[in-house]
Image: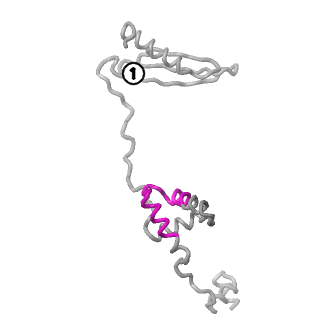
Amino acid sequence: MKAVADTLGVSRSNLNERLKGRSKPRGSYHKAEDAELLPIIRRLVDQRPTYGYRRIAALLNRERRAADKPVINAKRVHRIMGNHAMLLEKHTAVRKGRLHDGKVMVMRSNLRWCSDGLEFTCWNGEVIRLAFIIDAFDREIIAWTAVANAGISGSDVRDMMLEAVEKRFNGTRA
């Protein structure tokens, strides 16, 4: 036995167990209590077909707590739902790659404006935040705002938008 175990590179106890055949192969999972949970889980899944096993387990456990019964593990709910084909389908849709190549074509000025913001730290530690509006046709910066050591507020953005409209359309439009 030792020579065989050394040749195979396994322990002698492993070979002994295999020869005696003591361990039975596992059968399929079955618990008698699952039969009483199945109609409740099926009712919850029918009420909320888009819920996954975790949400169903939460609803089930909420009902069980209200009835002073012990809670059920979410893995057990997953197993029951899986055995009875109640699990949600995994994401099967294949998404296409990036649909936009980044080129924004515009035929004339003032058709499309773009905005962006950035921040950088100066040598003295101050943080400068900058936001701007750019015309997509001629790439001209129409309006901008900068703030030191603070965030750009909504009123700053609103003022920047009004400034851009006034510059491009000679006055505010309502």
Q: Which residue is mark 1?
A: 113
Q: Residue at x 65, y 20 (%)?
A: 149
Nearer to me, 44 or 129: 44
**Above or below: residue 147 compared with residue 91:** above
Q: Residue at x 37, y 7 (%)?
A: 170
Q: Quadrant location of the N terminus?
A: bottom right
Q: Quadrant location of the C terminus?
A: top left
Q: With 107 as the anchor, is 121 left or right in this view?
A: right
**Above or below: residue 21 compared with residue 103:** below
Estimate the x, y position of residue 99 in percent, counting from the top left. 36, 40
Q: What main secondary structure does the magenta stretch of the protein show? A: helix
Q: Which quarter of the figure has residue 71?
A: bottom right
Q: Residue at x 56, y 75 (%)?
A: 33
Q: Residue at x 63, y 21 (%)?
A: 150
Q: Which residues are magenta?
A: 37-59
Q: How many marks?
A: 1
Q: With 49 as the anchor, is 4 left or right in this view?
A: right
**Above or below: residue 131 compared with residue 45:** above
> Quick one: label 1, few (<14), some, or many (20+) residues within 10 Å?
some
Estimate the x, y position of residue 67 in percent, counting from the top left. 59, 63
Nearer to me, 126 or 173: 173
Estimate the x, y position of residue 42 in percent, counting from the top left. 45, 65
Determine whether the residue tagged by mark 1 lies in a helix, strand or loop. strand
Q: Which quarter of the figure has residue 111?
A: top left
